[in-house]
Image (cartoon, grey):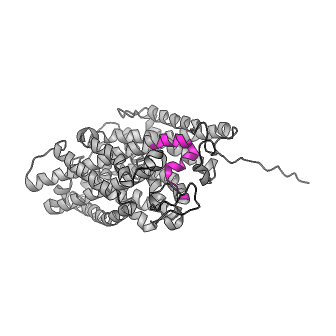
């Protein structure tokens, strides 16, 4: 497929339209309902979902863990599905170009660099290191080796995973779909098999009575921390789901696969992670497979999980590459697609050289993601659904800063950034992002939900009473019809 003429800033370059930052028309979109669902399943079922379940098991037992996982993921997946997924699917726009309507052209570039590239590299490193743990466990069990999870073998295996991911991404998003379509069904079989084996080995009545791995004294605080982990885990998909959704055939084909794929699959995988962590008394997902299935089945499961990690790296990488090309300026637009992959996965290759440091800070990494993404979602949802009534002037997104209605103040919407900062400060006041110590109010509110609400409210007030009166942002003018007096 090649780009067509007549769209904003379009030029006939012969480049695959899916690799372009221009809006995709319906004929250029490659994923229908079920295709996008399999992509989402492949994204959701990875050992990060197992690690999520293990992290929750540290705070609560099985019953509370299942409830917290369902509630936490439901909140964040709903918010992410509303924005950026729906507008990106409606207009076929790359999500960081869409953010120009909220933050301005230059402001969206700041968000893109801060959120997309940094988080994508960090997530790719986490996934690759998990894959390395699986390789080490397999070698230790099958060949009697004694390699550790922080040794050079993990780094080498993770580096190989990064290189393979880059080679696949260099061929474009179609290859992401093909790998996901093969891996996702296999992973579902693995998950079902794990549940059967766990419940066969340890009856539900026994597992349901097991205490949390951390055995912390305050159950109410622990339950809310478990919910917060679920919310933060769902927000972790924000940097990429919009860019993936623009390849779907429309809003419905994007919204519901998020629930069938990302929500249901990640909930299932996280619950399996809780069951495995509690029954085996271990928080390391790659340590579960061989003890549960034996050498043969466990080895097969480790291979499947490794492939799942690879699909997640691919999905993360593709979305970030498109974002960097569209918002990174002329330099990145001129780079060939394979070189773009190096810009994203290159930093991840550096991070895997420090496997223990990266892997042991999983919870803090989630917290630092949520402290930014929760208020971002609040600002974006209010801006798109309330202030703009789901209408975006696509051509204005591509005009120069001085000519676009989304130019704001020198290409930056200061009001939107004020709202995000207000939300981030709210999060920090409720849950410290470094030491993860909650405030007294946290047990009633969580941290992400108030952060979302504060950012949304501040943005609405500032846009309504500052930006709109000054003619900034192209917001529609609200006119009230005169009252009709009766006779």
At a point 41% along the width and 63% down the height, the residue shown is: 37
Instruction: Look at the magenta stretch and give its main secondary structure.
Output: helix
Q: In this view, does 377 lie to the left or right of 311?
A: right
Image coordinates of residue 336 in percent, x first then y, are 39, 53
Picture mark count = 0
Q: Where is residue 327 in the image (x, y as percent from the top left)?
A: 48, 46
x then y, percent, for residue 180: 34, 63
Residue 22 percent across, percent down from the top left: 52, 56
Q: In which quarter of the image is the C terminus?
A: bottom right
Could you tell me which residue is drawn at 53 percent across and 40 percent down?
106
Q: In the figure, 39 relative to 483: above or below?
A: below
Is 106 part of what is drawn in magenta?
yes
Instruction: From the viewer's side, name the closer residue of 159 and 266.
Output: 159
Q: Residue 151: within the magenta?
A: no
Q: Residue furthest left?
A: 144
* Residue toward you, 1 or 116: 1
Q: Is residue 179 above or below residue 382?
A: below
The stretch in magenta equals 91-112
Q: In this view, does 263 lie to the left or right of 202?
A: right
| Nearer to us in this view, 20 or 430 | 20
Q: Is residue 128 visible?
A: yes
Along the line of sight, which residue is nearer the eye, 419 or 335? Answer: 335
Residue at the far right: name it: 487
73 up-or-down from 178: above or below: above
Q: Is residue 358 left or right of residue 233?
A: left
Q: Can residue 60 be seen in this view?
A: no
């Amino acid at each position: 497929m090649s780009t067509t003429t007549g769209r904003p800033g379009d030029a006939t370059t012969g480049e695959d339209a899916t690799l372009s930052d221009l809006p995709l028309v319906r004929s250029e979109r490659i994923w229908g309902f079920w295709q996008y669902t399999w992509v989402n399943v492949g994204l959701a079922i990875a050992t990060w979902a197992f690690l999520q379940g293990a992290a929750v098991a540290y705070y609560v037992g099985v019953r509370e863990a299942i409830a917290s996982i369902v509630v936490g993921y439901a909140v964040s997946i709903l918010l992410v599905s509303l924005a950026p997924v729906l507008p990106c699917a409606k207009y076929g726009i790359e999500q960081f170009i869409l953010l120009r309507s909220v933050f301005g052209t230059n402001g969206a570039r700041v968000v893109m660099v801060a959120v997309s590239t940094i988080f994508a590299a960090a997530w790719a490193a986490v996934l690759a290191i998990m894959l390395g743990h699986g390789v080490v466990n397999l070698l230790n069990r099958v060949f009697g080796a004694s390699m550790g999870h922080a040794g050079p073998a993990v780094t080498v295996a993770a580096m190989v995973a990064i290189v393979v991911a880059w080679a696949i991404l260099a061929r474009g998003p179609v290859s992401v779909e093909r790998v996901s379509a093969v891996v996702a069904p296999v992973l579902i079989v693995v998950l079902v098999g794990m549940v059967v084996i766990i419940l066969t080995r340890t009856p539900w009545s026994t597992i349901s009575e097991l205490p949390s791995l951390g055995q912390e004294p305050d159950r109410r605080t622990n339950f809310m921390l478990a919910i917060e982990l679920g919310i933060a885990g769902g927000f972790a998909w924000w940097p990429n789901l919009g860019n993936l959704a623009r390849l779907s055939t429309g809003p419905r084909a994007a919204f519901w696969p998020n629930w069938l794929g990302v929500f249901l699959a990640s909930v299932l995988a996280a619950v399996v992670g809780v069951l495995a962590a509690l029954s085996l008394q271990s928080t390391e997902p790659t340590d579960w497979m061989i003890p549960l299935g034996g050498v043969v089945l466990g080895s097969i499961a480790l291979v499947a999980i490794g492939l799942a990690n690879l699909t997640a790296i691919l999905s993360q990488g593709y979305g970030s590459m498109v974002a960097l090309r569209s918002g990174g300026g002329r330099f990145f637009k001129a780079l060939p697609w394979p070189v773009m992959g190096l810009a994203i996965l290159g930093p991840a290759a550096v991070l895997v050289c420090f496997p223990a440091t990266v892997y042991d800070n999983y919870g803090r990494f989630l917290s630092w993601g949520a402290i930014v993404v929760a208020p971002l979602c609040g600002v974006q949802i209010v801006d798109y659904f309330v202030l703009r009534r789901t209408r975006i002037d696509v051509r204005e997104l591509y005009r120069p800063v001085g000519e676009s209605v989304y130019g704001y103040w020198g290409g930056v919407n200061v009001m939107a950034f004020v709202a995000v900062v207000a939300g981030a400060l709210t999060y920090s006041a409720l849950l410290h992002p470094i030491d993860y110590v909650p405030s007294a109010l946290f047990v009633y509110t969580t941290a992400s939900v108030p952060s979302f609400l504060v950012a949304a409210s501040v943005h609405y007030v500032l846009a309504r009473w500052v930006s709109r009166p000054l003619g900034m942002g192209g917001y529609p003018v609200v006119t009230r019809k005169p009252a009709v007096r009766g006779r």
